[in-house]
Amino acid sequence: MARPRKPKLAVWKFASCDGCQLSLLDCEDELLAVADAVEIANFVEASRTVIKGPYDLSLVEGSITTAHDAERIHEIRAVSKRLVTIGACATAGGIQALRNFKDVRELVAIVYATPAYISTLDRSSPISAHVLVDFELRGCPIDKHQLVEVISAFLHGRQPNTPAHSVCVECKLRGAVCVMVAHGTPCLGPVTHAGCGAICPAYQRGCYGCFGPQVTANTPSLSQWWSRLGAKEIDLVRAFRSFNAGAAPFRHEAKAHEAKTHTGKIHESKEPSAP
Amino acid sequence: MTAKTRNIRVDYLARVEGEGALHVKIRGDKVTDVQLRIFEPPRFFEALLRGRAFTEAPDITARICGICPIAYQMSAVHAMEDALSVRVDGQLRALRRLLYCGEWIESHALHVYMLHAPDFLGYPDAIRMAKDHREAVQRGLQLKKAGNDVVTLLGGREIHPISVRVGGFYRVPTCAELRPLAERLQWARDAALETVRWVGGFSFPDFEYDYEFVALCHPDEYPFNEGRIRSSHGLDTTAREYDTHFIEHHVQHSNALHSTIRGGGAYCVGPLARYALNFERLSPLAKDAARAAGLAASCRNPFKSIIVRAVEMLWACDEALRIIGAYEPPQLACVEVQPRAAIGYACTEAPRGLLYHRYRLDADGTIVDAKIVPPTSQNQKMIEDDLTRFVAARLDLAHEQLTLQCEQAIRNYDPCISCATHFLTLRVDRQ
């Protein structure tokens, strides 16, 4: 009797730091077991072998920032039974979505001597803005244990068990001391999606929101608490406008505080020239 | 004989970090053009840093690269501390070196076992290599894990760790936390020694070149976070003078800028450069292992960089154990830092080589201007030069084999294209 066909796994990259797909290679204890359970059919960072689709599960890292990539994601969706985005870039546009608040032509001119050589879109957008996404795994970077859970869940046709509560809940579960209450340190834990295990508070710093907003995040209330702890409007703009700047609750909260800043510092630099 | 032209093309280079391609044009018996094309989409980090607080630079620049975030964090904090006249010494400095040891072990183990060794043993990847070499692949994965364990303990997680800040750390470990790490590193040191022996037994193409090597040099230490910038051809300078000596060029075929030495040409950063300029500062164990693997005090065959990475991994295990053995928790996790208008410069040694950061700050510590030069963009021109020489001497090879060896020649540099574009597809054209 023929052996059942192994499910085909593909890993795709768009604009990103490679950290989320590296999380798969960082599963040092599980990698060979995963490779026994699935056929790694397309994972260019790890292999020269590319096996044609269709693929049972596609993991997509990175955001859409070029016209070519905006077309490529449709081709990938067409050959993928299930498509899961991994990380803040693919899910919310990533740190490179800071361009969405600036004039991209100026950015090109700052970095490159010959802007005409560079082809880029004026916005960095998440995968869900272009194609149907079956599941979004949060984090900048994702947590590797959650990644193994998601792969396992999709291969067995069940929903992944990835809690949707806030980092605040994880902090209590970990038994960490609240850095806001005990030390007056501003923390995004109350409005940030769980998944990291509340690392920052456990290391005595405030959460900086790298897993993006949780559902029903009460960002205006948290901003008031931050203000009472001495945070300025510019601090709030920077806090909400970072690795998940494109996620709606954070985007709106940053905008609300930007309107109250008059320094204009977050928008532009004063002196564009290098020393 | 007519001047036939042929092309070697690799449209999406595998087992490198990021997106790149290679295109080699051959006319008759001459290589007429080599283009390492980096099509990784640009992310404009230097521009996005403008208007951010100086305290945010380590977390933001870490996102340039998921493979070597510590390197970005280290160059960022040192540049800020240079601007703000802050000196981080003693155990805090030692902990930074320990964190860097973790990243070198993790990154070198990834490259030696998962990305580069399959070329030497004839496999498309480490997972398929594991079918015949399971013990070796398991050893590589566990070495990688040992490096990641160091980063996770000190930094909270392997990728984009969260504990590094300008002035020190958010939290420092206790002696009790470091003890189990020392046990794993003792295993890792034996495994790294075995790695040097294993890769030393590979066969290497006969290919050498008199590279201008550039690396940090420190009088007492194999370099991580500080030292003078020296070259094998006599350059001796500091990070503050970097822009005077090194020039970036924007070429049409790449989203990464090329670097050259002013008045010179291409140069080489990374393990070969560090090793050639700092051999005497390696630990006795690492030196002996290098000699036993057939290396002299300098290695000019880039294919043997896999041995040098293994030697550096061995040294990093030794150094990490030394630091842990001498550790006493510092009283404060961080020294106080006050913003002011200033410019700061720093170079540190990322696993792939010299990483330069420069920031200009205004009076309240807002970043006005930033410049970042990653190792892969510095090596880009040298990779193209290597390929020109390498292909010219091997025109009689079958197309498939030549293409494979070109890819291997690129992987010699462990190029991190995500960094450099801030990618790579290989094409060899023969007509």
Image (cartoon, rainbow, N blue to C red):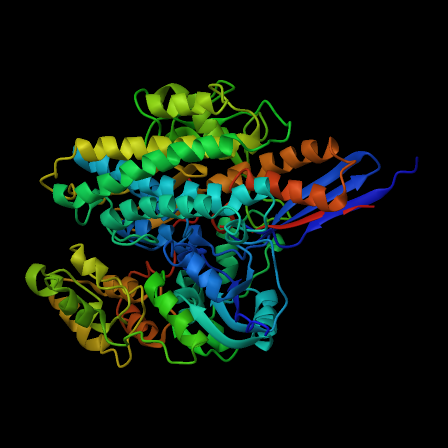
Residue most toward the left?
A: A182
B26, A260: nearer the viewer: B26
The answer to whether one can see residue B413 in this image is yes
**Could you tell me which residue is drawn at 49 percent across and 29 percent down?**
B272
Question: Viewed as shown, does residue B181 lie left or right of B119?
Answer: left
Question: In the rendered image, which quarter is residue A145 located in?
Answer: bottom left
**Could you tell me which residue is drawn at 12 percent across and 39 percent down?**
B329
**Could you tell me which residue is drawn at 87 percent across and 41 percent down?**
B4
Q: Is residue B15 above or below residue A239?
A: above
Give residue B155's position: percent from left, percent from top: 26, 49
Q: Is residue A66 above or below residue B30?
A: below
Q: Is residue A146 above or below residue A134?
A: above
Q: Is residue B404 above or below residue B42?
A: above
Give residue B123's position: percent from left, percent from top: 59, 48
A128, B185: nearer the viewer: B185
Give residue A117's position: percent from left, percent from top: 62, 53
Question: Viewed as shown, does residue A97 lie left or right of B409?
Answer: left
Q: Quadrant of the C terminus of chain A?
A: top left
Question: Viewed as shown, does residue B238 lie left or right of A48?
Answer: left
Question: Viewed as shown, does residue B251 lie left or right of B216?
Answer: right
Give residue B378's position: percent from left, percent from top: 52, 37
Residue most toward the front?
A: A1
**Could you tell me which residue is drawn at 13 percent across and 41 percent down?**
B175
The answer to whether one can see residue B348 in this image is no
